[in-house]
Amino acid sequence: GEDVEQSLFLSVREGDSSVINCTYTDSSSTYLYWYKQEPGAGLQLLTYIFSNMDMKQDQRLTVLLNKKDKHLSLRIADTQTGDSAIYFCAERPDTDKLIFGTGTRLQVFP
Amino acid sequence: DTEVTQTPKHLVMGMTNKKSLKCEQHMGHRAMYWYKQKAKKPPELMFVYSYEKLSINESVPSRFSPECPNSSLLNLHLHALQPEDSALYLCASSPETHEQFFGPGTRLTVL
């Protein structure tokens, strides 16, 4: 099947905003998610958006959803060095089934 | 207790060994999951248990055998693994809603 696509790498300066993009495959997915994975660790659920929403804001995180283009983005405001990690988007095409994106490595430099 | 725990953290085994991975959650979640994650790749779903019954098996080889003895515990029994099975094995659980919460993983090396 098709992959859920993300750009491989993003490098930003501390204090700037980061935008991580994701193109998903299944237009019937009811929820879309963003997870964070630090080196050698499990996945941390950051936020999610219901498919009938265009935008969701949660503190420094803003999720934008364009259903027509099947495009999801995560904006991190005031990016900090602790935000350095791999970020995965995920779609939920079926109950209990998550399909993860290819992952974006975010590097924050001072 | 609001987390998913996994033991052991690291495991090294030979191709003829039998070992088990363990996952626990005490949040009353109804579903538990096993994922496999190879280096620099996204997690891939292996198995799902919903209300202690196996509901999804993603065509995983029989050398991986899941078990859900009760609603808080999920095991993954390993037998006759291959070196290409070396990976990070992640457990997750889910309440009645849609979110999945992950444990820290077991890093498995097969020699």
Image (spheres, rainbow, N blue to C red):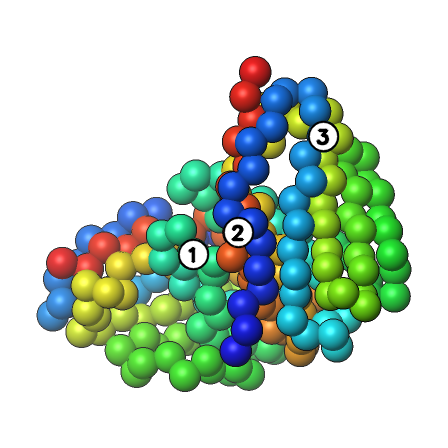
Which residue is found at the position 40% from the left and 68% from the top? B75
**Looking at the image, which is closer to me, A73 or B8?**
A73
Q: Amino acid at mark 2?
A: Gly
Give x and y (percent) for residue B18: 20, 69
Same-chain status of marks 2 and 3? yes
Give x and y (percent) for residue B7: 37, 52
**To which residue does mark 3 refer?**
A17
**To which residue does mark 2 refer?**
A103
Q: Is residue A52 left or right of residue B28?
A: right
- Badge 3 local density, few (<14 within 10 Å), some, or many (20+)? some
Give x and y (percent) for residue A36: 58, 45
Quarter of the image that includes the C terminus of chain A: top right
Pointer 2 chain: A
Mark 2 vs 1: CB contact within 8 A: yes
Q: Amino acid at mark 3?
A: Ser
Pointer 3 chain: A
**Rendered image quadrant of residue A90:** bottom right
Pointer 1 chain: B
Which residue is found at the position 65% from the left and 71% from the top? A25
Which residue is found at the position 71% from the left and 45% from the top? A74
